[in-house]
């Protein structure tokens, strides 16, 4: 049987560039080089994605970078680093995407916490659905929100015994920290496409940890 090739989907160049910047900050220059060498992406060191919104950074690269970090540092330590890379990606991304979205102008400080929470999730879902080939939907239940990724770059083409989208989880954690004015919330990936589920689903408690 011939191998089944996956469709080709993309993040914008700018988002790929931000992920690499966050990886360098979290891992250091030499370990980042080792990670990139592991998956044959070392040219990204000298020729990073250009700083524009053209969708040219493949999902395969995003997924490969997460898997390579696990390979270089070990699964547990690698996933911890991928979570922190996700948090850093959000911080850098706010600066780059704010001129387009006007994120900093949102009157979140004046909203009740529950409304801040929902508006923040809506804004970031819009970022992914508008600027990337990632597909995000939102849902909620009694005491929790669901962030549902129907087309996920973080585990694209991977197989895993357990959820492995730590970069997405870290990004969500930091997005909620920003939207809520400095509160932390429990974010847990309950389903993952790489582990055989139909979607990558994150359960987010509505009540802060602190």
Image (cartoon, grey):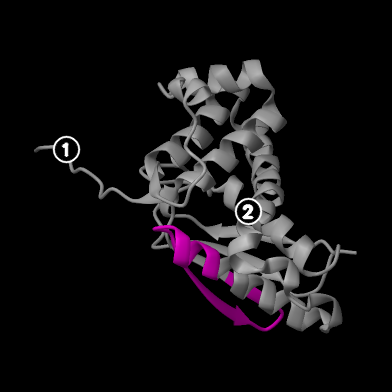
Q: Quadrant of residue 98?
A: bottom right
Q: Residue at x 44, y 21 (%)?
A: 43
**Separation of marks 2 and 1 at Cα, in angstroms:** 31 Å
Q: Is residue 163 magenta?
A: no
The answer to whether residue 130 is left or right of residue 147 is: left
Q: Is residue 164 visible?
A: no
Q: Which mark is residue 169?
A: 2
The location of residue 178, given as percent across then percent down, is 77, 62
Which residues, given as a range, are shown in magenta? 126-146
In the depicted structure, whether residue 121 falls above or below residue 89: below
Q: Is residue 136 magenta?
A: yes
The location of residue 105, given as percent across then percent down, is 74, 72
Q: Is residue 86 visible?
A: yes
Task: Name the secondary structure under disc 2.
Answer: helix
Binning the other alpha carbons within 10 Å of mark 1 as few (below 14), some (14 to 19) or many (20 upward) gives few
Task: Name the secondary structure under disc 1.
Answer: loop
Q: Quadrant of residue 63?
A: top left
User: How many callouts does the rendering have?
Assistant: 2
The location of residue 29, given as percent across then percent down, is 65, 20
Q: Which residue is mark 1?
A: 3
The location of residue 111, given as percent across then percent down, is 81, 83
- Most extreme residue toward the left is 1
Q: Residue at x 50, y 23 (%)?
A: 36
């Amino acid at each position: 049987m011939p191998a089944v090739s996956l469709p080709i989907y993309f993040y914008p160049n700018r988002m790929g560039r931000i992920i690499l910047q966050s990886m360098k900050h979290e891992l250091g220059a030499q370990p980042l080089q080792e990670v990139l060498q592991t998956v044959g992406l070392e040219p990204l060191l000298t020729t990073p994605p250009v700083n524009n919104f053209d969708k040219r950074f493949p999902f395969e690269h995003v997924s490969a970078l997460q898997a390579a970090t696990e390979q270089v540092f070990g699964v547990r330590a690698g996933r911890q680093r991928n979570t922190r890379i996700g948090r850093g990606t959000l911080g850098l991304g706010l600066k780059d995407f704010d001129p387009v979205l006007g994120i900093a102008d949102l009157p979140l400080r004046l909203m009740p916490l529950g409304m801040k929470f929902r508006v923040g999730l809506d804004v970031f879902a819009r970022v992914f659905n508008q600027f990337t080939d990632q597909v995000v939907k939102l849902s909620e239940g009694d005491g929790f929100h669901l962030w549902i990724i129907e087309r996920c770059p973080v585990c694209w083409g991977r197989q895993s015994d357990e959820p492995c989208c730590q970069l997405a989880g870290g990004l969500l954690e930091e997005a909620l920290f920003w939207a809520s004015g400095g509160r932390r919330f429990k974010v847990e990936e309950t389903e993952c496409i790489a582990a055989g589920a139909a979607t990558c689903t994150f359960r987010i408690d509505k009540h802060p940890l602190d």
